[in-house]
Amino acid sequence: MALDATTEENAMIPASGRYIATYTDTDGVSPPDRQVEAFDDEGRALVLADTGRLEPAASLPGFAAIHRRPAIVAVLPPGGWTVQDDDDPEGTRPIAGWLVDENGETLPLLVDEENGYAHPPDGPVRLRQPVEEGA
């Protein structure tokens, strides 16, 4: 059941942007998480489907759960930390900063050199402490 607009028959409650729908592997490809855009009048989470329409999150293949994403409350400078590249064990690249969420957890902010934007990592990364000169 796709929803196009808010009407009395299908009232939608906007989501705060802090909920995500997670999905499990169904065909050898790990599907991306999807941000919950709204909730329908029955409380079902709605996500933007590949069709460009809002669909109940649970109706898409591999649906696992809805999770609340902690709010980012601060961004800290990088302090010289780097991330080791998987492709080159000797190579590292600098991080752009640290994201701090409401639970006090931190994530490195990585730079996508091809597109010029920063993002948290998609999975685990190997961090390298800054090396002091003369050490």
Image (tube, rainbow, N blue to C red):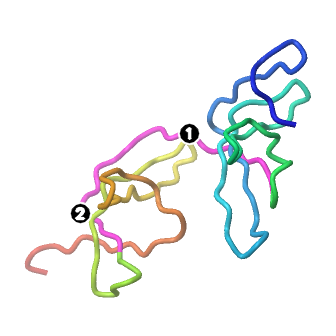
Q: Tag 1: residue type? A: Ala
Relative image position of residue 98 (x, y in whole percent): 38, 53
The residue range painted magenta reads 64-83
User: Where is mark 2, residue-wise?
Assistant: 80
Q: Is residue 25 above or below residue 1?
A: below
Camera-side residue of 105 and 72: 72
Residue shown at 83% from the left, 19% from the top: 11
Relative image position of residue 17 (x, y in whole percent): 62, 34
**Residue sitting at the far top:** 8
Residue 75: in magenta span: yes
**Residue sitting at the far front:** 51
Q: Is residue 127 left or right of residue 62?
A: left
**Residue sitting at the far left:** 134
Q: Is residue 26 above or below residue 33?
A: below
Residue shown at 68% from the left, 34% from the top: 37
Q: Is residue 111 left or right of residue 122?
A: left
Q: Quadrant of the C terminus?
A: bottom left
SS for callout 2: loop
Q: Tag 2: residue type? A: Gly
Q: Is residue 25 left or right of residue 119?
A: right
What type of secondary structure mainly makes up the magenta span?
strand
Relative image position of residue 111 (x, y in whole percent): 33, 58
Q: Is residue 119 above or below residue 2?
A: below
Count the marks.
2
SS for callout 1: loop
Residue 105: in magenta span: no
Question: How crowded is the residue under tag 1: few (<14 C-alpha within 10 Å), some, or many (20+)?
Answer: few
Marker disc for residue 71: 1
The residues bearing labels 2 and 1 have C-alpha atoms spaced at a distance of 25 Å
Which quadrant would residue 62 be assigned to in this image? bottom right
